[in-house]
Image: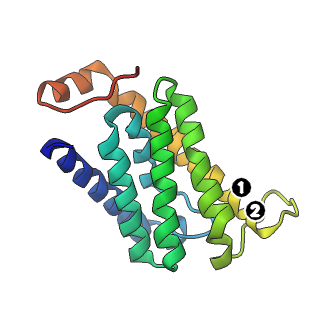
Amino acid sequence: MDSRDVSLTAIFTAFYVVINVVQMMTIGNPTVSGPVQLRIADCLIALAALLGWPVVAGVTIGGFLTNAYYFLGPTDVVFGPIANLIAASLILLLRKRRLLACIVGALPIGVIVGGGYLWWFFPPPDIVGLNLPEWAAMMASITISSLIAIAVIGYSLLTVLSRPSIIEPLKSRGLKVVTES
């Protein structure tokens, strides 16, 4: 990693934290750290397909800082960022098929955060009247939220930012873009 990669990592770390704090202050904390956790900042995870490892590192560190700020406990501070790391890494690895990458990238967050531990902290939401075990209901809730944030909002953001009219001027100023191959 060179200084540009470190700078881009810092930018994505800051974006991730600031978006979460603004969301918490305007909409409310349960949407950032709760049983129906639609973290708008997770849309940044999709950009790993375009900008690579700096995004992977940025959303991982940003997840750590956000979870440390909302502090549900050490489990969340450790495993939430690991979920972001796995999600962004999968998107980077599957970048040739961006929509599929974003869908697959949402799954680790649902499984690790929802199914793994979040149900210890909150009662799970009712999933259309299904009588699911607590861990399964929470995993479904967080997976659906992650799909919205990453595969809908994130994929849309990735598509817009990948346009030549946007990315070419940035590349001409030294921004590294990962290729699809």
C-alpha distance separating marks 1 and 2: 5 Å
Q: On residue 137, which mark appears?
A: 2
Looking at the picture, does residue 166 appear above or below residue 75? above
Residue type at the position of mark 1: Ala
Q: On residue 128, which mark appears?
A: none
What quarter of the picture does the N terminus occupy? top left
- Looking at the image, residue 160 sits to the left or right of residue 4; the answer is right
Looking at the picture, does residue 48 appear above or below residue 133? above
| Residue sitting at x 18%, y 26% | 171
Q: How is the image coloured?
A: rainbow
| Residue sitting at x 25%, y 26% | 167
Looking at the picture, does residue 141 appear above or below residue 1? below
Q: Are marks 1 and 2 in contact (CB under 8 Å)?
A: yes
Dot 2: within a 10 Å radius of its alpha carbon, few (fewer than 14), some, or many (20 or more) residues?
many
Residue type at the position of mark 2: Ala
> Which quadrant of the structure image shows residue 130?
bottom right
| Residue sitting at x 47%, y 66% | 27
Q: Residue 146: x and y, percent? A: 57, 50
Camera-side residue of 43 and 176? 176
Q: Residue 96: x and y, percent? A: 47, 23
Dot 1: within a 10 Å radius of its alpha carbon, few (fewer than 14), some, or many (20 or more) residues?
many
Q: Can I make out residue 28 in this image?
A: no
Q: Can I make out residue 103 in this image?
A: yes
- Looking at the image, residue 16 sits to the left or right of residue 5; the answer is right
The local secondary structure at tag 2 comes to helix
Looking at the picture, does residue 124 appear above or below residue 172? below
> Which quadrant of the structure image shows residue 124?
bottom right
Q: On residue 140, which mark appears?
A: 1
Q: Residue 15: x and y, percent? A: 30, 55
- Looking at the image, residue 110 sits to the left or right of residue 105; the answer is right
